[in-house]
Amino acid sequence: GSTAEAVWVYNDSFFGAAGYVAVTKRATDAGGEVVYIGAGLEPAALVSLATQTLKQQGIQGTGVCDSDELEQVLRQDTSGNVHRIAINHGEVSATASDGTELAPYEVVITAA
């Protein structure tokens, strides 16, 4: 593989002044990539990095929604048709990344 690329660098007066990197990524010989996180990060901060990595690898995703109680997934049937499945595990309504409103505990399956 190639050398690691700095994705996020520290910008504080301690680690930043020392030139430390918080997140790096490296392409693999097989066409994938490795992302190394050497810092404590809020989970929400990783969404953009994960989204970018999945997109670069050609992995289709459902998008991101604001609810921790909403599960979204894409599934392909034996005929090759892709379906979007959204499951609201919470007791309040939630909005999926495609704008679909789900009532509490509702399951919605649509063509993707």
Image: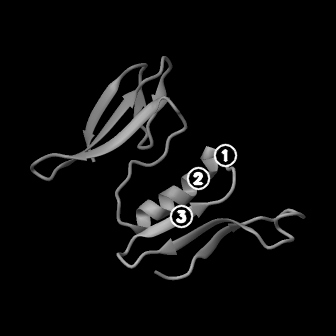
Q: Nearer the viewer, residue 93 or 17?
A: 17
Q: Is residue 95 above or below residue 39?
A: above
The reply, left or right, for residue 33 in relation to residue 81 is: right
> Tag 2, which secondary structure?
helix
Q: Which numbered circle lies on residue 42?
A: 1
Q: Quadrant of residue 103?
A: top left
Image position of 107 (left or right of 89): left
Front residue of 112/73: it is 73
- Amino acid bearing label 1: Glu
| Secondary structure of the residue carrying numbered label 1 | loop
Name the outermost residue toward the bottom.
2
Circle nearer the viewer, 3 or 1: 3
- Residue type at mark 3: give it: Val
Give the number of the disc on residue 35: 3
| Mark 1 surroundings: few (<14), some (14-19) or many (≥20) residues within 10 A | few
Which x, y percent locates residue 40?
Answer: 69, 50
Q: Residue at x 40, y 70 (%)?
A: 32
| Mark 3 vs mark 1, CA separation in Å | 16 Å
Instruction: Tally the marks.
Output: 3
**Mark 2 or mark 3, which has the lower sequence index?**
3
Write down the residue under mark 2.
Answer: 46
Residue 22: percent from left, percent from top: 69, 63
Q: Are marks 2 and 1 in contact (CB under 8 Å)?
A: yes
Q: Answer with left or right where residue 47 lies relative to residue 86.
A: right
Residue type beneath disc 2: Leu
Residue located farthest toward the right when viewing the structure as drawn: 13
